[in-house]
Every structure is written in C-alpha cells, then in structure tokens.
Image (cartoon, helix red, strand yellow):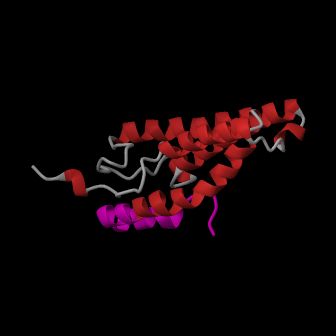
Amino acid sequence: MTDSSHDTPNVVIFPPLIPLSVLVAGIVLNLFRPLRLLTHVLFLGRIVVGAIAFVAGLGMVIGANRIFRRIGTHTRPSQPTLAVATTGIFTWTRNPMYVGGSLALLGIAIGFALDWVILLLAACLPLVHYGIILREERYLERKFGDEYRRYQMKVPRYWWRF
C-alpha cells in the first residue's frame, strides 16, 4: 500500500472556505459599515444580473463535480487526483469550480447589494490564484506530465489567457 498523503497539491487552504469566509465577513461588514454603492443600482436590474450570475456560477460548479464523479477522481484537494478532467465545462476553463464559485458569489453580492463581498472577493483572488490554482497546476504537471501540459496549451486557466 502506498502513502497517498504526499499525492496532493498541498494547497494553503481548503478552497470552499474562501467564498464562505468572504460571504460571512462581507455580510457582517455590510451590516456594520455599509458602503451602499450597489443600492443605487435599480433593484430589478440587480436581481436579474445577480440571479443570472449565481445560476451560471452554480451550474459551472455542479457540472464540474459531475464530470469529476464520471471520470472517477476526487474533488477535494486533500485527496489524490486520479484523472485529468478535459470534457464539458473543462473545455472552456481549467478551473470551472473556482470561476463558477466566484461568479455565484458575485451574483449573491450583486443581488443582495453586498458591496463588501465584492471587495473581499477581489482581495481574495490572489490567494486563490497563488495558494491554490498554481499549486494544483504544478501537482498535475508532476503527476500527469505531457498529458496535462497538452491540456494546458489548449484550454485557458480561467476563460481568457493573459
């Protein structure tokens, strides 16, 4: 039996804790120090845009989870990756869970006029990029080699290339 504890990307934080923390902290800050920027946007417009962003983001996360289950790999970065996901939403972005989660959180923030959530989300993006995504990419390159490098060449990290 092999020790799989080293067969992980060694991310700095369990990824779902970031949007959860951003949402909770943003709500608390909005209660005690409201900025009231989004409240100036037409209510119906906020609700429509927020709902669209939330549904699209949630759809991306659910779709990515389904693909992971179908190919028989883990979703938690504390467990080894068993296969590279390259179909469905993974043909548009290599990180649909992070992009989708951020989009869903943005939708909540817009719909409920939670200005602080947007600011905190923007502040946390470097943590997600450097502390999670880049570590996962290095891990996948080590584990899957040329297969993953070919995938990287075809599909952007997010929805765009820098």
Taking the image as drawn, is residue 155 in sight? Answer: no
Magenta stretch bounds: 138-162
Q: Is residue 44 left or right of residue 111?
A: right
Near-viewer residue (67 or 104) = 104
| Residue at x 68% of width, y 43% of height | 106
Position of 4 with respect to 136 (left or right) is left
* Quadrant of residue 9 within the rendered picture: bottom left
Question: Residue pushed farthest front?
Answer: 32
Tell me where residue 101 appears, x and y as whole percent: 57, 43
Give the percent coordinates (x, y) of residue 125: 59, 57
Secondary structure, magenta segment, majority class? helix
- Image coordinates of residue 77 in percent, x first then y, are 37, 49
Decide whether residue 160 is among the magenta residues.
yes
Q: In this rendering, would 92 be left or right of 38?
A: left
Q: Residue at x 58, y 52 (%)?
A: 92
Q: Quadrant of the C terminus?
A: bottom right
Check residue 103 for magenta coloring. no
Q: Residue at x 24, y 57 (%)?
A: 6
> Which residue is rendered at x = 63% and y = 56% of the image?
123
Is residue 13 something that shows in the picture?
yes
Q: Position of residue 96 (x, y in %)?
A: 54, 48
